[in-house]
Image: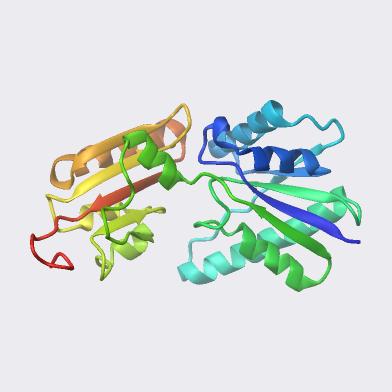
Amino acid sequence: MSRTILIIGIGAGNPEHITVQAINALNRADVLLVPTKGEEKAFLADMRRDICERYLTNPDTRIYNYAVPTRRNDGSYENGVHDWHHAIAKIYEDVILETSGDNDTIGLLVWGDPMLYDSTLRIVEHVRANGRIAFDLEVIPGITSIQALCASRRIALNRIGLPVEITTGRRLSEGWPEGTDDVVVMLDGVEAFRSVQDPDAEIHWGAYLGTELEITVSGRLGEVAEEISEIRKRARQENGWIMDTYLIRRTRKVGTEDGT
């Protein structure tokens, strides 16, 4: 026998996003690990606790809070992320050994979907590779911020017969991806939408999706880019943090396959 780690997708922020499968997983866990990221992001830990209060019916399940280290910003981005992941993996090891027995089930609550722009799976594999803890692994999918954005704006993600690329602001700022006219940006600290040279492109932008703080804006990029930038700045100042996602649909020339 060995421990079981459950990686549980809990949705984009609305407690009602959580699936029946995820609720059952919460109640299978002997220990639920809740990360804390300082006062600025206390809202995120509070949302996890709210989910537990709503759906946790197993009186024997224990909740354990642990602090997440800050990712360093000096040096290369890739090296910083690599070191950060290994630091979190060490915390996972220590916390799991401290809070659980050899046959216990440990639940990790992950925003959105664990398979899309989240590193919990990679971090847990670092734990496995370190060899201190033997465990089985189960993953429960969740609703993503992309789904929450499209539902909030009442739009389909893709245009008929056309692909959608999911990327980061850092990569979009380096140039528009080849082979698509529809791009979803999940992580953007540089406001890469301002670098898109198509004022007629359509943008659907949302922040704090699914939560009581949700803000959304849609329109022609040339008309709303400045508005989005100002909203982002103001929201970050008011809340201390921001998580946003957006879809940009570049204009396509009639009669061409690739829009060029």
Residue at 60 percent of width and 44 percent of height: 37
Q: In this orientation, does residue 172 appear?
A: yes
* Whether residue 243 can be seen here: no
Please state, as top left, top right, bottom left or bottom right, where the N terminus lies in the image: bottom right
Q: Total of numbered circles in the picture?
A: 0
The image quarter in which residue 57 lies: top right
Q: Is residue 14 above or below residue 164?
A: above
Snapshot colouring: rainbow
Quadrant of res 133: bottom right
In the image, 29: left or right of 108?
Answer: right
Q: Which residue is pictured at 26% across the width and 64% down the height?
A: 180
Residue 195, given in percent of the width and then of the height, sits at 21, 57
Residue 183: x and y, percent?
A: 30, 57
| Residue found 91% across the figure and 52% down from its top | 101
Residue 188 drawn at (x, y percent): 37, 53
| Residue at the front extreme of this rendering | 161
Q: Point out the image quarter for the C terminus.
A: bottom left
On screen, residue 177 versus residue 142, left or right, reads left
Residue lying at the far left of the rendered structure: 254
Task: Depth check: give the residue in front, 114 or 175.
Answer: 114
Q: Residue at x 38, y 59 (%)?
A: 168
In the image, residue 170 sits, relative to residue 205, either above or below, namely: below
Pinpoint residue 141: horizontal percent, then vertical percent.
59, 50
Q: Is residue 46 left or right of residue 233?
A: right
Please state if 229 lies on the left or on the right of 240 as rendered. left
